[in-house]
Image: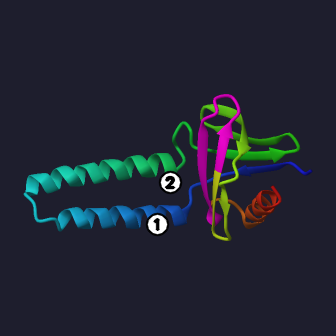
Amino acid sequence: MQKLEIKLKASKQFFGLNLFLMLGAMIIVLSLPVNFLVKLLLLTGVISYASFNFYYFVFLKGLNSPQILKHDRNGWSVITRKGEFDVILLGDSTVTQFISILRFRYLQTQSTLSCIIFQDMLPKQHYRQLQVRIWNF
């Protein structure tokens, strides 16, 4: 089996989806019939959550954010900012033409890692190779 190594980058589609959701939440907060101070407090919470979400999940800057996925005859491994970990691909992973949601379990700790991969996060050929590997899993 040929070795597959996929370096992930930030997704414009994921950025747009998150931006749409966060702007929607801000509009809802601003349209609530409550005191201005309460609106300001809620808006601060939405902006804080949006900042966290963009930094850790959209821009892949979190410690546990997957940077590189590897697959070879020995199985799967994930490289994060903490290091390289051997993982097992779980059966509840979902692969479609536009998005893949991969769920892994760390071999060392038995905790799980979810990885959302939009098709624009990597070159088309690599996304196709990833789909084929997972469909043949």
Residue located beneath label 2 in the image: 58
Q: Residue furthest front?
A: 91
How many C-alpha atoms fall within 10 Å of the one at disc 2: few (<14), some, or many (≥20)?
many
Q: Residue furthest top?
A: 108
User: What amino acid type is highlighted by mark number 2?
Assistant: Val
Tell me residue 105's x, y (percent).
Answer: 66, 40
**Secondary structure predominantly adopted by residues drawn in magenta:** strand
Determine the residue positioned at 57% across, 43% down: 65
Q: Is residue 2 left or right of residue 53?
A: right
Q: Which residues are magenta?
A: 103-120
Give residue 122's mark. none
Determine the residue positioned at 60% across, 35% down: 111
**Secondary structure of the residue carrying numbered label 2:** helix
Residue located beneath label 1 in the image: 16
Where 98 falls versus 106 (above or below)? Answer: below
| Magenta-drawn stretch contains 50 | no
Determine the residue positioned at 66% across, 45% down: 104
Tell me residue 84's x, y (percent).
Answer: 70, 34
Q: Residue furthest left?
A: 35
User: What amino acid type is highlighted by mark number 1?
Assistant: Gly
How many C-alpha atoms fall within 10 Å of the one at disc 1: few (<14), some, or many (≥20)?
few
| Magenta-drawn stretch contains 110 | yes
